[in-house]
Image (cartoon, rainbow, N blue to C red):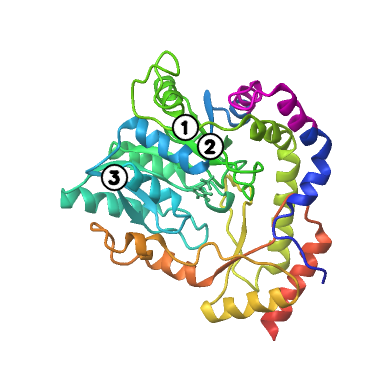
């Protein structure tokens, strides 16, 4: 097979070239590189898409997660509950704010935060009495929204703030609500490989809370007050470049079409692989935006064998994630840590993701599944 792309950004560019090139040219000719009109236009269109009242376009997904913690004044002595099976940024922002991440386990079939484990960890931290439970950051991993019905209930019971990490979740849905609209505040990333990606780093924050929105808008520009040289709090330089906004506008307008192709591709994968492989679950009431299509091998040895055979055949695969966060060097010495999170640990040994993007064809999906089945039988 000809070498395939894991995420075919070139095919997307070929398709959207005229609009993207025109947008870039317009920004360069207008020379409004910081906070140009395209940024506000993008924020408005993102509000319309997600159904949120307020949106702030920012410099990265990580800053989009960090700024709500800064705005709420989360810091030393506070516990922030996060899944152990995610990208490090979800926990890192708690540490950056001076708070303590508390790791929770995930569900085997959806890869998302397990509400039972969350409840257990919150109650353990309350019992121990050393940290103050403040916030939960569920992740919409691989494009599938977390179980917000159960998680919102736990947050209400225990007076916890809820920050949705929708870095991979943009375009997902749960019970008719779009990703980036769950909890008190949501963060997404426009890193190029995400469902909605720009040509560099970028992100956005969403909330319905006007006061929180105003505080985060101030944090985005060095804690500004009435103007840039009036500084009322410690902030960041966390703006999204105008060029990135201009690139995102045509991509956002093409998003639903590409999302439909990703959903169709996922359905083809599942149809061709079900019964032979543990395929990802999309429970009733959910729609994923398929940031990744992720299988679970029986064990570590089988994963290594299958991914090596696919590589040989020209099919790229990725392992998201090879190590759970509570086992990472950076968090090894963390007190208040659960001893074992068995599902997260086991998934890191077994998962691998197949090529997924909005320009896949049934022919390509069939060829990939054919290679995978041959490798399994070998
Ligand atoms: C990518 C990602 C982030 C961070 O986004 P950046 O734009 O790379 O800073 C945070 N959380 C999750 C789950 C991610 O996948």
Residue 284 picture location, percent across and down: 57, 49
Residue at image x 71%, y 51%? 262
Query: 170 above or below 10?
Result: above
Q: Which residue is mark 1?
A: 237
Q: Which residue is mark 3?
A: 99
Residue extent of the magenta highlight: 22-45
Residue nearer the viewer, 278 or 130 = 130
Residue at image x 69%, y 74%? 311
Quadrant of the rendered structure where residue 200 is? top right
Q: Can residue 33 be found in the magenta stretch?
A: yes
Marked residue nearer the N-terminal end (3 or 2): 2
| Residue 171 visible to the viewer | yes
| Residue 299 visible to the viewer | no
Q: Closer to us: mark 1 or mark 3?
A: 1
Q: Classify 10 Å Cα crowding around label 2: few (below 14), some (14-19), many (20 and above).
A: many
The residue tagged with tag 2: helix, strand or loop? loop
What whole-number distance in Å separates the C-alpha atoms at marks 2 and 1? 8 Å
Quadrant of the rendered structure where residue 204 is? top right
Query: 6 above or below 118?
Result: below
Q: In the image, is the residue at mark 2 within 8 Å of ligand 1 by its beta carbon?
A: no
Q: Are marks 2 and 1 in contact (CB under 8 Å)?
A: yes
Residue 111 picture location, percent across and down: 50, 58
Q: Classify 10 Å Cα crowding around label 1: few (below 14), some (14-19), many (20 and above).
A: few
Look at the image and tell me in which quarter the C terminus lies: bottom right
Residue at image x 69%, y 67%? 316
> Which mark, residue 59?
2
Instruction: Single out the residue that lies furthest toward the bottom.
Output: 378
């Amino acid at each position: 097979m000809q070498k395939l792309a894991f995420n075919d950004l070139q095919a997307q560019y070929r398709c959207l070239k005229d609009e993207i090139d025109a947008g870039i040219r317009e920004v360069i000719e207008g020379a409004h590189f910081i906070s140009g009109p395209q940024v506000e236009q993008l924020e408005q269109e993102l509000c319309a898409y997600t159904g949120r009242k307020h949106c702030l376009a920012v410099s990265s997904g990580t800053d989009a997660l960090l700024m709500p913690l800064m705005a709420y004044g989360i810091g030393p002595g506070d516990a922030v509950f996060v899944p152990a099976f995610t990208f490090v940024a979800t926990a890192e922002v708690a540490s950056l704010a001076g708070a303590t991440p508390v790791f929770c386990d995930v569900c085997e079939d959806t890869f998302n935060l397990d509400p039972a484990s969350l409840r257990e960890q919150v109650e353990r931290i309350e019992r121990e009495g050393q940290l103050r439970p403040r916030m939960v950051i569920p992740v919409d991993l691989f494009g599938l929204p977390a179980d917000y019905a159960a998680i919102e209930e736990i947050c209400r019971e225990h007076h916890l703030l809820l920050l949705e990490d929708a870095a991979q979740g943009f375009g997902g849905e749960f019970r008719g609500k779009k990703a980036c609209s769950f909890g008190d505040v949501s963060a997404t990333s426009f890193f190029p490989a995400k469902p909605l990606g720009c040509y560099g780093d970028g992100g956005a924050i969403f909330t319905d809370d006007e006061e929180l929105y105003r505080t985060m808008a101030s944090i985005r520009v060095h804690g500004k007050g009435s103007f840039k040289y009036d500084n009322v709090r410690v902030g960041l330089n966390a703006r999204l470049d105008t060029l990135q906004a201009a690139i995102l506008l045509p991509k956002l307008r093409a998003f639903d079409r590409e999302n439909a192709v990703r959903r169709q591709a996922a359905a083809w994968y599942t149809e061709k692989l079900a019964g032979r492989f543990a395929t990802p679950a999309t429970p009733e009431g959910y729609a994923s935006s398929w940031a990744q299509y992720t299988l679970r091998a029986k064990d570590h040895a089988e994963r290594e064998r299958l991914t090596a055979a696919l590589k040989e055949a020209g099919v790229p695969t990725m392992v998201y994630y090879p190590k759970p966060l509570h086992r990472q060097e950076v968090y090894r010495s963390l007190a208040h840590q659960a001893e074992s999170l068995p599902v997260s640990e086991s998934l890191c040994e077994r998962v691998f993701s197949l090529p997924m993007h909005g320009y896949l064809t049934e022919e390509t999906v069939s060829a990939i599944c054919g290679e995978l089945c041959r490798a399994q039988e070998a």
